[in-house]
Image (spheres, grey):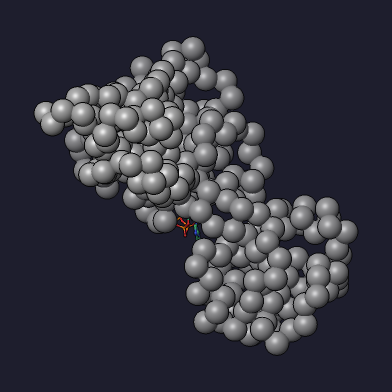
Amino acid sequence: MNLTIAIQKSGRLHDESIRLLKECGIAFTNGLNALKVDATNFPLTIFQLRDDDIPQYVEDGVADVGVVGENVLLESGHAVDIAERLGFGRCRLSVAMPRSAPFNGPQDLQGKRIATTYPSILGDFLKAQGIQAEVHTISGSVEIAPSIGLADAICDLVSTGSTLLTNGLVEVLPVLRSEAVLVTNRSLSGEKRHLLDQLLFRMAAVRAAKETKYIMLNAPNEKLDAICSILPGIKSPTVMPLAESGWSSVHSVVKEDVFWEIIQELRDAGAQGILVLPIEKMIAT
Ligand code: PRT
Ligand code: ZN
């Protein structure tokens, strides 16, 4: 029995979804153009669909799990669980207005016409903020709505902000931060849950590796205590003697987000010949 995963067939989330599966060691034979692709080395079948259909398919159990933007998931309102946040497809859903329009706070949206493809998320947001505005649901090219007189403001996805800029709009109010998420059907069988757990385990190892670097350095033996206290490692650093007496090599791992601070501390503590290497997979437990 295969676990089935729905991913976007083409579009912004497709390549990263495939990359995620490949990084988890999943291989496919038949071309990736097919609607249905079987993995060759893991009991997994991939369905390639329009992103908008994925929450429904996962809720109905047509696919067991799926990769979809949180924005699409929330707008759809389908009942699925989020098993993992995937860290790609990041964007925000924001209200934007023409550059010339005055905006001093959410109350300035009162009575305004806002065009969007996200009426549900926007409607909930406005309600929570106590703003009464007219939500105009349109199916695309939201950014041109103000210039053609269809709306006073828009609510759309923004990543770099260049689409807003070229249409003379400015982001005035963030509504939602979104990224791709792995969603799961709520009544997976024990067998499928077991396969999903294996997949999640691999994803965690890939993510941990991306967040961590392997570090090697040389240090005079009298400085080892100070250096080891800076480098906690998974358990503790590895210390090996160098051929030159009185010197050792120290190997450990460091978190990407504190990496530069740690390098500076290590240099100050007497470390030399520091090498930093990427880690491919990391299984910490
Ligand atoms: O064909 P299908 O229905 O599957 O695809 P789609 O056209 O509906 O979706 P697609 O591929 O455009 O986006 C898929 C998902 O990517 C979205 O649901 C988001 O979760 C995520 N994502 C991340 C984005 C963006 N960034 C993004 N910038 N989706 C759309 N945009 C659009 C935005 O709507 C606007 O038109 O890009 C434009 C703004 O980009 P910037 O860089 O100019 O700010
Ligand atoms: Zn879509």
What residue is shown at x 59% (from left), y 31% (from top)?
81
What residue is shown at x 64% (from left), y 49% (from top)?
75
Residue 149 against residue 44 in the figure, above or below: below
**Picture quadrant of residue 200:** top left
Residue 9 against residue 190 in the figure, above or below: below
Q: Looking at the picture, how far across and down is residue 148, in whole percent?
A: 64, 85
**Picture quadrant of residue 139:** bottom right
Res. 216 in view:
no
Picture quarter with the N terminus: top left
Q: Residue furthest left?
A: 243
- Name the side, left or right, on which 268 lies relative to 134: left
Q: How many marks?
A: 0
Q: Looking at the picture, how far across and down is residue 88, in whole percent?
A: 45, 49
Residue 125 against residue 139 in the figure, above or below: above
Residue 142 against residue 131 in the figure, above or below: below
Q: Looking at the picture, how far across and down is residue 131, in whole percent?
A: 85, 63
- Name the side, left or right, on which 121 lies relative to 48: right
What residue is shown at x 71% (from left), y 53% (from top)?
120
**Picture quadrant of residue 129:** bottom right
What residue is shown at x 88% (from left), y 59% (from top)?
130
Res. 149 in view:
yes
Q: Looking at the picture, how far across and down is residue 207, in whole percent?
A: 41, 36
Picture quarter with the C terminus: top left
